[in-house]
Image (cartoon, rainbow, N blue to C red):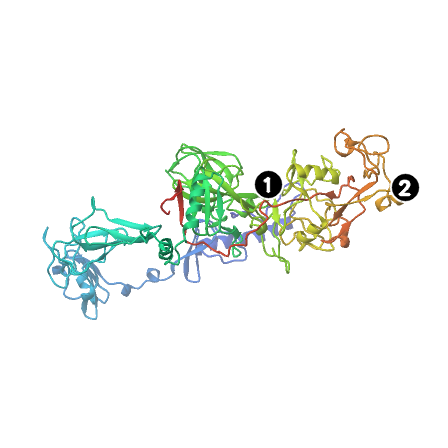
Amino acid sequence: MAKLTEKNILDYRLGGDKLSDFALKYMAEIPRIYQFLNNIRTHDSVGTEQVEPEPYQIKVEDDKFYVRNKANDAWLYLFDVAKNGGMRSDSFGKQSAGSISSRPQVGNTSGDVYWDTDNGRVYMWQSDAWHLILSLHIDDLIGHDDVLTKSDLSVPETGALATAPNKLVPLNANGVLPVNVSGNAGQLAGVNVQINKLQDGQVLTFRTASNVWRNEDKGVVGAGKALAIKDGNTLLAEFSGDEAVEFDTGRTAHENNENAHAKVFAKHNTSTDAHANIFEKVQSIAAAHMYNFYYRSGQFHTDAATRTALVSPAYILVNVGGNGYESKAAITLDISKDAAWDTAAQEWQASHAYAVGDVVYPTSGHTTYYYRCITAGTSSTLTPSFPTTLGSTYNDGNVVWECQLDYTQAVNRKGKDFYVYACADGDALKLVVSPNSTVPTKYTADSSRKIGGFHCLCADVGTISGHALSGYVAGDILPASIWDLKFRATSENEGMVWDGSQWVDIYLDSWNGSSLVSAYGGVVADGYSTKPFHGELFVEEFAKVKKHLISRDQYVAFAKGSNEKTNIKGSADANTTGGHVDTAGRRMISNIGCEDCCGWMWQWTSDISGHPNASTSNSDMPGGSGQTSSSEGDHWLIGYNWQNDGRSVANINVDGSTNIYGHSYGALSRAIVGGGWGDGSSCGSRSVNLNNLSSNRNDDNAGQGTSDTGDKKRLAKHPSAGCMSLGIAKIHNGRRGGLV
């Protein structure tokens, strides 16, 4: 804070102030001094020159007394500059205390207060009388007649029942209500009671079949058990020993006439659902005895309202680890919720015992990370400061946590594949989602089975009029990517969508070091990538992963909805796959979710044609080019025989191999589609170039794979939506267990 300091300093040095300077400084400084002295005398801030205040400084202005606060950012008003700080003597009455017998007969002034210390009451003298203003006694309350008191209770002696009328009865020392109940009690142990025509010698009996208590004679079957005859879940007859029960199985004694079996058949089919459960029972036996058994009533699909919820078929029957399990209701797995995932993450707790594999998230809520227990123990009493580096560890008490991705967060799901597992959870079946492609977290290969999967969108689509994915955001489930064991590609399904006839790669393929893959963010495989590709090599490598090149007709179908007559933003090679926009700022994505179909890379197709009479002259070559030498940059071939003979391109320049693959008599052309990064308005879902030889290596020629489906008959999407009540059972050796 600024202090009071000299402002007009005299300069006594040789050549310093002149006499006139001295006089002027004196005349300026002396009034300042007197102003500050007068400010101190009056505790005000009057004057032409102001100084910043100090903490706890006082001042008097406008007939008010102020003090500066400790922070020195405000003046605090204390009281008025008046007698007794502005407080009047008639504002308060006299206060005294003692027994009620010592209370004065009258008060000296209005506002006198007397404290009755014996009885816990406070009185004030007003209008020539003492008035009760505070009391510890409920009887003193105005309108206390509606307040319960001890007199409203009936407390019988130990062992006795309450008999006083119009009284409330508290529980006795044993927690029992000591009353006599006339008529039927509503429930005993949470079970309804049905008393009807009570008779001598009868007892109250619980019946599981009807889930009620009822009065019955004491006769029983066996050790107090009832005999129940059932057909599946349907009760046909019940015998408890108290009355005769007759039950006809519907079977007819064999007759020695031609009508004997006709009568039995007619009797058996009197019920409209006589055969309703036969198929289900056959399936149950199959699921329990066939290791690879899998049946479902429809297909997995997304909940259109959330785009993050996967809805199972209404009925699933599956073998897991040699046992059959069934689900009899649709199950919703919302991947934005912890309950859908194999991790089953829960909020961290202090002083809690954790086992290896347990997963938690911070008490502050979800971040982008989970924390998995890798060393069992008990957590600390202190809230942990969890790390945010993937794979790092944290010591919490004697628990050790490892930082992992939290896939409930959309940012961690974008452009990734996830899997659906049927898991044995004791005798119950549980469906979980996992990022693991082999075994889900907390389960083993014997207690889980991968039955499906899906791919999540790599980048926001934005608003595109008429587009099937308009409004979808990164991390949403791509509906066309959902697969299961009954509806999948002959290849692996990662990074693929269904186009209505075949499975097709979402992304332009990249080389992972051993095979072609459809992956978000992969370096695209083209004629000049680390492993150079041309049409012939794409055919070869796709075959190794049970895929093949797309056809032009197929491309026209799955590319629908992509950007038309534009190329990629920047008009340059994007290098890595997925999430791009065009020169108009529109996402380069088709209606089913295929990325970069138009305007980045020309894509090889399976459509080929030959030019048997082609020669080395430009006029005979497709596109009018006759480059044949290995020194030519684009490596177009005519009559190539895959050997370095000075006339064709050496294998090592094309395939990275020195093997000889034979001779081509004439030029083999292969159609490419979509358009490249500099083709502008020529790009589109029906753009095609027929001037490319199959062996051409170019930096804007890429490949996209497709695969047949293992099940040619695609089931119609089951209309189930949302989450229904769940009934899942384990079947041991063909027998259905209890519902869970």
* Residue at mark 2 to residue at mark 1: CA–CA distance: 45 Å
Q: Which residue is drawn at 75% across and 43% down?
A: 700
Task: Please state the horizontal and vertical placement of residue 17, each as a whole percent of the image.
Answer: 64, 46
Task: Please state the horizontal and vertical placement of residue 264, each as a whole percent of the image.
Answer: 36, 54
Q: Which of 235 and 459 is in front in this view?
A: 235
Image disc number at residue 311:
none
Amino acid at circle 2: Ser
The quadrant where residue 108 appears: bottom left
139 left or right of 623? left
Few, some or many residues within 10 Å of mark 2 (<14, 14–19, 20+)? few
105 left or right of 580? left
Q: Which of 244 and 443 is in front in this view?
A: 244
**Which comes before the other along the chain, label 2 or label 1?**
1
Q: Which residue is drawn at 21% across and 71% down?
A: 127
Task: Please state the horizontal and vertical placement of residue 286, each as a whole percent of the image.
Answer: 45, 42
Residue sitting at the far front:
257
Q: In this view, does 91 lie above or below 555?
A: below
Q: Nearer the viewer, residue 33 or 300?
A: 300
Tag 2, which secondary structure?
A: loop
Task: Please state the horizontal and vertical placement of residue 134, each as a whole percent of the image.
Answer: 22, 61
Amino acid at circle 1: Glu
- The reply to whether dot 2 and dot 1 touch (C-beta < 8 Å) is no
Q: Which residue is drawn at 19% across and 70% down?
A: 128
Q: Mark 2 points at which residue?
A: 617
Few, some or many residues within 10 Å of mark 1 (<14, 14–19, 20+)? few
Q: Nearer the viewer, residue 149 or 527?
A: 527
Tag 1, which secondary structure?
A: loop
Labels in figure, total: 2
Image disc number at residue 492:
1
